[in-house]
Amino acid sequence: METVIILVFVFGYLAITLEHNIKIDKLIPALVMMAISWALISLGIDDFSQWFDSAKHSLMENFGGLGHEEKMHLMEETLLHHLGKTAEILVFLLGAMTIVEIIDYFDGFSTIKSAVNFNSRKKLLWMFSILAFILSAIIDNLTATIVLISILQKIVKDRSVRIWYAGLIIIAANAGGAWSPIGDVTTTMLWIGDKVSTGKLFIYLFIPSLLCMIVPTFIASLLQPFKGTLELQEADDKPKNKFSSTMLFLGLGAIVFVPIFKVITHLPPYVGMMLSLGVVAIFAEIYSNSKFAISAAHAEEHDAHASHSPVHYSLSKIELPSILFFLGILMAVAALESLGILFGFADSLKENIGLVGTEPAGTIVSDLVVLLLGVGSAVIDNVPLVAASLGMFSEPLDNQLWHFIAYSAGTGGSMLIIGSAAGVVAMGMEKIDFFWYLKKISWLALVGFIAGAIAFMATRAIF
C-alpha cells in the first residue's frame, strides 16, 4: 500500500510540473493526490507497521500492535494536526493577499510608479531589482512580482524589453523573500513551524540574499538589452486617489507588524495577520465613504466600486487557486510524513551519503544535499520540498541547516521559470516562453544562487 501511495504522489507531482503541457491547473492534481493518499491510508491502516508522531517528531514504537479502532483514532488526530498546521499558513496568506488587494483598490502602488521619471535602461533595471528585493520581504515574492510587473507594463512599451526586466524581477523577488519570515511561502512554513526565528533569519540570510540579487543584476546591466534608453508609456489621465499613499504605507506597515506581534505575544503569525487585516479594513471602509466625488470625472470609477465595500472587493480578487494548491500539496506531503516514509528517507540519506560522520565531513555533505534541494526546487515546486524537509530533519530552532534550506529553496527556484510562484505568475502576465527564460535568464539565476550560497557559508563561519 505504501508503494501505491508513493506512486499516487509521483504521478500527481508529474501532473503539477506538466501543468502547461496537459492544460490542467496544478491545483487539481494537488487536491486529487491529497484526497486519494489519505483515503488509501484509511483503507489500509491495518497493513502499516509504523506511524510518525508529528507532535513528538519521532516514529511510534508500538503502532503495529494497536487495534483497528486505535489506529483509526490516531489517523484522525494526525490528519487534524496537519490540517491545523496547514490552515495556519493558508489563513496567514489569505490575510496578506487581502491587505495587498486593499492597497491596490486605493491605487496605492501608483506612488511607486510616479517615482519613475527617467528612461535609462540600466537605472530602471536597478530600481526594479531593488524594489523587488525590498517589497518581496514585506509583502511576499509572489505579490511583489505581480505588483512590479503591473507597474512595468504601465511604464515600458516594448514587450521584448519588458520580459528581460521581468526575468530579473523574478530573481530579485525570490532573493528578497528568502531572508524575511513573510517573504516566501517556504520561509513562512519554516517560521511558523518554529524552525527559524526572525532575527537569526536576517543575520544569516540577508547578505547571501542581497548578493543573490546584486550579482545577476550587475551582470545583466552589462548586457545589450539594458544599454541605452527606452521609450516610456505616456502617463494616463486617471485622477489620483487622495488616499493612495496613506493606504500604501498603512498596509505595508500592518504586514511588517506581524513578526513584531509574534515576538511580543508568542501567538501564531496568522493571529497577528488577522489583526493587521482588521485594522487596514477599518481604514479602508472609512476612506471609501469619502473616496468618490460627485462629478463626471469620477463617475466611471464610482460605478465600478460603489456596489461593494473595499474588503469584499479585495477578497474577490485574491488568488484562491494558489491557496487550494498549497492545501493539496501540503496535506499530500503530510500523508507521506505520517507513514514515516520521509523520516525513513532522511535516515537512509544520512547513512548512505555520510551525514552522520565527523562534523566537517557531515557539514560538507549536508551542504551539498541542501544545494541539491535548491536546484530541485527549480524543477519541482519548492513548497513540497520544504514540507518534506520538515518531516525529514529534526534539528532544533535556528539550526543553520534550516536557514540554508530557507535560502536554497527560496532562491533556487529562480533557475527555471516554473520553479517559483513568482516565475509562474510572471510567465502568465507576460507570456514568457519557458525556453527563452532557460536560455537568457537561468544562467544569471544560477550565478546569483552560487554567490549567495558561498556568502552563506562564510556568514555561518563568522556567526
Image (spheres, rainbow, N blue to C red):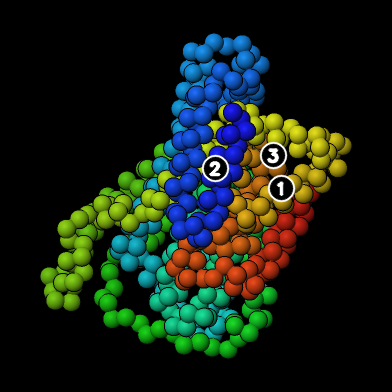
Quarter of the image where one finds residue 313: bottom left
Q: Amino acid at mark 3?
A: Asn
Please give the residue where the numbered disc 2 appears in the rendered image: 189
Side (left or right) of 294 relative to 363: left
Q: Secondary structure at mark 2?
A: helix
Please give the residue where the numbered disc 1 appears in the rendered image: 370
Nearest to the eye among marks 2 and 1: give it: 1
- Residue at the image position 46 percent from the left and 27 percent from the top: 80
Q: Where is residue 130 drawn, in percent x and y?
A: 56, 68
Along the polypeptide, which appears first: circle 2 or circle 1?
Answer: 2
Q: Residues within 10 Å of mark 2 (few under 14, many from 20)?
A: many
Q: Is residue 275 above or below residue 166?
A: above
Comparing 58 with 66, the one in front is 66
- Residue at the image position 69 percent from the left and 31 percent from the top: 344
Comparing 147 with 267, the one in front is 147
Along the polypeptide, which appears first: circle 1 or circle 3?
Answer: 1
Side (left or right) of 359 relative to 395: right
Of the numbered discs in the image, which one, if any, rests on residue 422? none
Specify whether residue 170 is in view.
yes
